Image (spheres, helix red, strand yellow):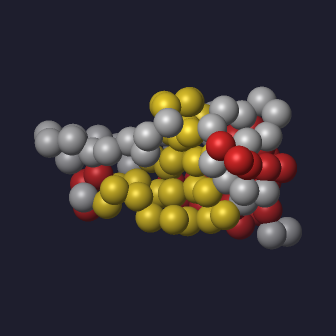
Amino acid sequence: MPNLYFCQPHAKNQGMLRAVLSVHECERVVLQHPATYVGENFPRLGIGQEATNDFAIISFRPDETAAGWRPGYYRVDSDLDKINESLLALLR
């Protein structure tokens, strides 16, 4: 099951687990907030990146990868409040 993390560089937050999604739920979120594959390692905030905008990360474990998804991490550069609204809409 994909995990979704919220990352807030200005707060030096490397990533807080926000949701554990089914693949179907993940695909519904990504329809509204496109994700870009960033590799097999969780992105780390480097020195001087404090001004970087907040973003989300979706992770797929190698043993849980579904069709169309690669194992690793995807970055979602949407407003975290809007992503949160999409997550809450999954409950309806």
Q: Is residue 43 left or right of residue 38?
A: left
Percent x, y of residue 67: 82, 33
Can residue 40 be seen at all in this image of the molecule? yes
Check the image and name the residue furthest to the left: 48
Can residue 79 be seen at all in this image of the molecule? no
Check the image and name the residue furthest to the front: 63
Closest to the observer: 38 or 54?
38
Q: Which residue shows up at 72% across the image and 34% down it?
A: 69
- Could you tell me how many numbered marks the image carries? 0
Q: Judge whether 9 appears above or below 16 on screen.
A: above
Closest to the observer: 23 or 11?
23
Percent x, y of residue 65: 73, 42
Q: Which residue shows up at 44% across the image and 40% down it?
A: 41
Q: Judge whether 31 appears above or below 24 on screen.
A: above
Q: Which residue shows up at 77% across the image and 30% down it?
A: 68
Q: Which residue shows up at 72% across the image and 56% down it?
A: 1
Percent x, y of residue 88: 71, 66
Residue 89: which quarter of the image? bottom right
**Quadrant in which the C terminus is drawn:** bottom right
Q: Is residue 2 left or right of residue 53?
A: right
Q: Judge whether 25 appears above or below 90 on screen.
A: above
Percent x, y of residue 30: 70, 41
